[in-house]
Amino acid sequence: MSSEQKLANAGPLGLMGFGMTTVLLNLHNAGFFPNSAIVFSMGIFYGGLAQVIAGILESRRGNTFGTVAFISYGFFWISLVGIWILSAKGLADAPLEANMGWYLILWGVFTFFMFLGTLKASKVLQFVFLSLTVLFALLALRDFLDSHLVGTIAGFVGLACGASAIYLAMAEVLHEQHGRSILPF
């Protein structure tokens, strides 16, 4: 690659994969529709593979934070769908809710540390990671308590989290396309 060749910003791709998949799953969590092949497919392909690709591209740009975030959350989505499908097809035992809670706690701890990495970044990116930390905590609490109400609340937090990621992705795309800030970020 020549020193004059500019690499595209893959961040908006990763943010859209994360944001749209998060919104879709949390429409389910908030009680608007059942979990289905729509969520599974989005989780594998856009939330999963597109984020992994974005993370690899961010690595080429030297962006460690973007690399770790997108590849990790891409594989989060793939592993989550894997848990659902493997247990539904009888290829593995369905996890106990408490075990699922621990899975979500681990992702919440990881996300909290990633949030700390955003403290010198834009306020919108900080909100994405802080709301995602809260979302993982609420989802774990839902599983530990077997609480439909906590799951519904988590769904609405997830909608805000996913929407903020979509907003940030579009703000970055529009900024690059127009050469100026169209949406503040």
Image (tube, rainbow, N blue to C red):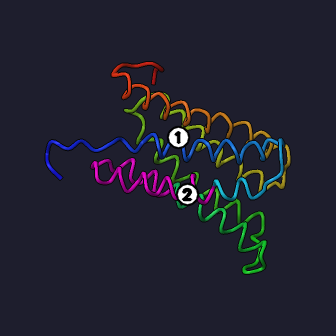
- Residue at 37% x, 57% y is 56
Find disc 2 in the rendering and name its residue.
48
Residue found at the far bottom of this picture:
91
Q: Quadrant of the C terminus?
A: top left
Residue 48: say if magenta.
Answer: yes
Q: Which residues are magenta?
A: 43-72
Q: Which residue is at 71% across, 48% downward?
A: 25
Counting other residues with Cα less than 10 Å from the Cα at mark 1, is it few (<14), some (14-19), or many (20 or more)? many
Residue type, label 2 = Gly
In the image, is 161 to the left or to the right of 97? left
**Residue 176, x across and y down, in percent:** 36, 29
Q: Is there CB contact under 8 Å for labels 1 and 2?
A: no
Residue 59 spot, x, y in % from top left: 32, 54
Vertical arrangement, residue 143 with respect to residue 125, above or below: below
Q: Position of residue 99 (x, y in %)?
A: 71, 67
Give the mark nearer the N terminus: 1 vs 2.
2
Q: Residue at x 39, y 45 (%)?
A: 10
Residue drawn at (72%, 79%) of the image: 92
- Amino acid type assigned to the residue bearing label 1 in the image: Phe
How packed is label 2: few (under 14 Cα within 10 Å), some, or many (20 or more)? many
Label at residue 102:
none
Of residues 134 and 22, the one drawn nearer to the viewer in this rendering: 22
Residue 129, label in figure: 1
